[in-house]
Image: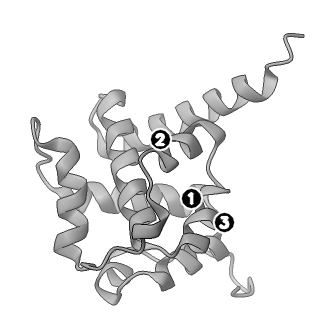
Amino acid sequence: MSGLESLDHTVQLTHVWINDLDARLEWDNKARSYRLLKAVLHAIRDWLSVNEAANLGAQLPGLLRGAYYEQWHPAKTPVKSRSMDDFLAQVNEHFRRDPLPNTAQAVMEVCHLLNKKITAGEIEDVRNSMPKEIRNFWPEPYREPGAPRT
């Protein structure tokens, strides 16, 4: 054994997330899908309180967690301008050279992925921390019938 099983595992998990998103988007461009995932995670992180951002980060695979925290300035969060247009503009900053055809749809696909990969209770907390305009855009997480709300 190499002793690096946990590192291998987080790389595998990250690939699963990226492959899943790439398939949802029908892009066949994993590098671009990773860039979108990272851009949306950064936008979400910047809209959350420090504690809520940390709670979300704790549920990400280690490799994505590192990307999530890149260039984070906790003292500047949550951002002051918190409209849907501001959110989409922040994501679009990562695609200046190759603009997304439909940023809102691409972000929604990331939200669906997060709903699938993050616990429903944490997604609910994140959604409830967002402005209503974004909360209404982000689909509620799936819950088993009869499952308690957190």
Say which quadrant the C terminus sits in: bottom right
The residue depicted at 48 percent of the width and 55 percent of the height is 113
Q: Secondary structure at mark 2?
A: helix
Estimate the spatial distance between the alpha carbons at disc 2 and disc 3, rounded to whole Å: 17 Å
Taking the image as shown, residue 55 lies to the left or right of residue 108, namely right
**What kind of residue is marked 1?**
Lys
Question: How dense is the environment of label 2, judged by Cα within 10 Å: few (below 14), some, or many (20 and up)?
Answer: some
Image quadrant assignment for residue 98: top left
Q: Between 4 and 50, which is closer to the camera in this rendering?
A: 50
**What kind of residue is marked 3?**
Thr
Q: Nearer the viewer, mark 2 or mark 3?
A: 3
Which residue in the protein does label 2 denote?
20
Number of the label disc, if any, that sits on residue 119: 3
Count of all numbered marks drawn on residues in the image: 3
Q: Residue furthest top?
A: 1
Image quadrant assignment for residue 111: bottom left
Proximity of marks 1 and 2: CB atoms separated by less than 8 Å? yes
Residue 58 vertical position relative to residue 35 in the rendered view, above or below = below
Which residue in the protein does label 1 denote?
116
Q: Secondary structure at mark 3?
A: loop
User: Where in the figure is residue 32, as x and y percent of width and height?
Assistant: 29, 34
Q: Residue furthest front?
A: 75
Taking the image as shown, residue 81 lies to the left or right of residue 15, namely left
The residue depicted at 61 percent of the width and 50 percent of the height is 60
Residue 130 vertical position relative to residue 16 in the rendered view, above or below = below
The residue depicted at 40 percent of the width and 46 percent of the height is 38
